[in-house]
Image (cartoon, rainbow, N blue to C red):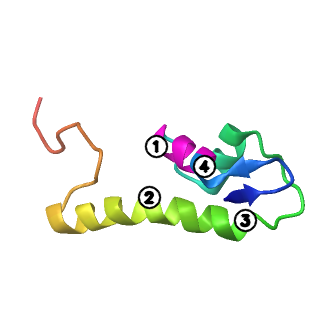
Amino acid sequence: MYVCICHAVTEDDVRGRITAGAASVKEVRAACGMPPGCGSCTKRLCALVSERRAPDLLADDLSGTLAGLDAEVGTAA
């Protein structure tokens, strides 16, 4: 399904950019080559970005750490 009809960007395109590391609507727009336009895609973009961020936030709550954070925190040098 198209997310942005102005630039022919699909949900698969958006999800691919999110998987590749785009973490915000602004980053997804840039990665997909979507300059600001009519704005009809903004709501759906927000939903798709939120879908990806929600599991990370849940993992943070369950583990007490930040999801995706590899560095150890609080170790003395």
* Numbered disc 4: secondary structure: helix
State yes or no: discs 3 and 2 in contact (Cβ < 8 Å): no
Residue identified by numbered label 2: 52
Q: Position of residue 28 (x, y in %)?
A: 63, 47
State yes or no: discs 2 and 4 in contact (Cβ < 8 Å): no
Q: Please count the marks in the image.
A: 4
Tag of residue 35: none
- Indicate which disc, 1 or 3, sits on the residue closer to the N terminus: 1
* Numbered disc 1: secondary structure: helix
Q: Quadrant of the C terminus?
A: top left
> Which residues fall within the magenta stretch?
13-20
Above or below, comparing residue 55 to residue 27 in the picture: below
Q: In 3D space, how far apart are the residues under numbered discs 1 and 3 (Cα atoms)?
A: 19 Å
**Left or right: residue 10 compared with residue 35:** left
Q: Nearer the viewer, residue 51 or 26?
A: 51
Tell me if I can see residue 12 in this picture.
yes
State yes or no: discs 1 and 2 in contact (Cβ < 8 Å): yes
Above or below, comparing residue 33 to residue 52 in the picture: above
Q: In 3D space, how far apart are the residues under numbered discs 3 and 2 (Cα atoms)?
A: 16 Å
Q: Amino acid at mark 2?
A: Arg
Q: Amino acid at mark 1?
A: Thr
Q: Nearer the viewer, residue 10 or 53?
A: 10
Q: Position of residue 54 (x, y in %)?
A: 39, 66
On the image, which quarter does residue 65 sit in?
bottom left
Residue identified by numbered label 3: 42
Residue identified by numbered label 1: 19
Q: Amino acid at mark 3?
A: Thr
Q: Position of residue 45 (x, y in %)?
A: 64, 61
- Indicate which disc, 4 or 1, sits on the residue closer to the N terminus: 4
